[in-house]
Amino acid sequence: RRHAIAVLSLAGLSGCGFALRQPPSFNFQRMHMDGPTNSVLFQSVLRNLQSVDGLVVTTEARQREQAQVVLQLGSELPVKEVTGRTATGAVREYQLRVRLRFKVRNRQGIERIPDTEMVQQRDISYSESSALAKEAEEDLLYRNMQSDLVRQILRRLAALRDI
C-alpha cells in the first residue's frame, strides 16, 4: 500500500512539470566580462560562470575579441535607508537595497540585453540592545541579495537565444 502511494505521488509530480533544478545551459561557449573586478558581485558572477562546463569566461581586455558575448556589469550600489522610527526618534527599521546595472552585447557590438537595472531590497528591524546581532543580520541580508542578483543574471544569460 505504501509503495502504491509513493508511485502515485511521483506520477503526480511528473505530470505537473516538476523537475529538479538543472545547471544553466548557454547558447555560447566564449564569454568576456567587463566591470569592477574588485566587486564582490563581479567575483561571484565570474565564479558561477566559470563553474559551467564548456563555457570559457575571460576578464582580460586583449581576449575580448574572441568572446561571442560580452557581459558588462556596472558597480553595485548598496543603500541603507531609515524607514521607521520610535516615538522618541530612535531608529526602529531600515530598508536595505542593492542596485546593479548590466548589459550584454554580442561580438559585433549589438545589444542582446539592453542596459538593465536590477534592484533587491529587504527590510530589517533594529534594536540598540542587539546592535551586534543586527549588524551580522544586515551582512547576511546583503549577501543574500547579491546571490539573488547573481542567479537572475545567470537565468537571463541562459535565456539568450539569438547571439
Image (cartoon, rainbow, N blue to C red):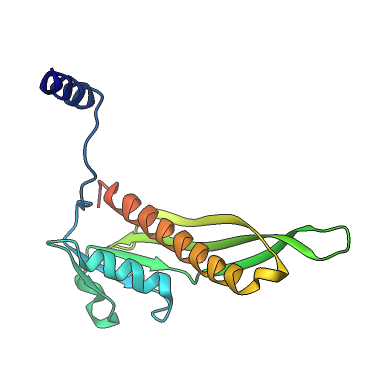
Viewer-nearest residue: 119 or 91 = 91
In the picture, measured across the screen, residue 148 lies left or right of residue 88, that is left
Q: Quadrant of residue 77?
A: bottom right
Q: In the visual, does 46 lie left or right of 9?
A: right
Residue displayed at 24% across by 32% down: 18
Compare residues 143 and 161 and report the one nearer the observer.
Answer: 143
The answer to whether residue 112 of the structure is visible from this angle is no
Determine whether, in the image, residue 96 is placed left or right of residue 27. right
Q: Residue furthest right?
A: 88
Residue 118 percent location from the top left of the image? 50, 56
Quadrant hosting residue 95: bottom right
| Residue 126 image position (x, y, % from top left) | 68, 63
State the residue in front, 119 or 61.
119
In the image, residue 32 above or below residue 163: below
Question: What residue do we see at 16% from left, 22% from top?
Answer: 11
Q: Position of residue 156 (x, y in %)?
A: 35, 50
Up the image or down, 143 lies above or below 122; here it is: below
Q: Quadrant of residue 32?
A: bottom left
Residue 2 versus residue 61 in the image, above or below: above
In the rendered picture of this protein, how many numbered marks are placed on residues?
0
| Image position of 26 (left or right of 42) | left
Whole-percent x, y for residue 138 in the image:
56, 67
Quadrant location, the N terminus: top left
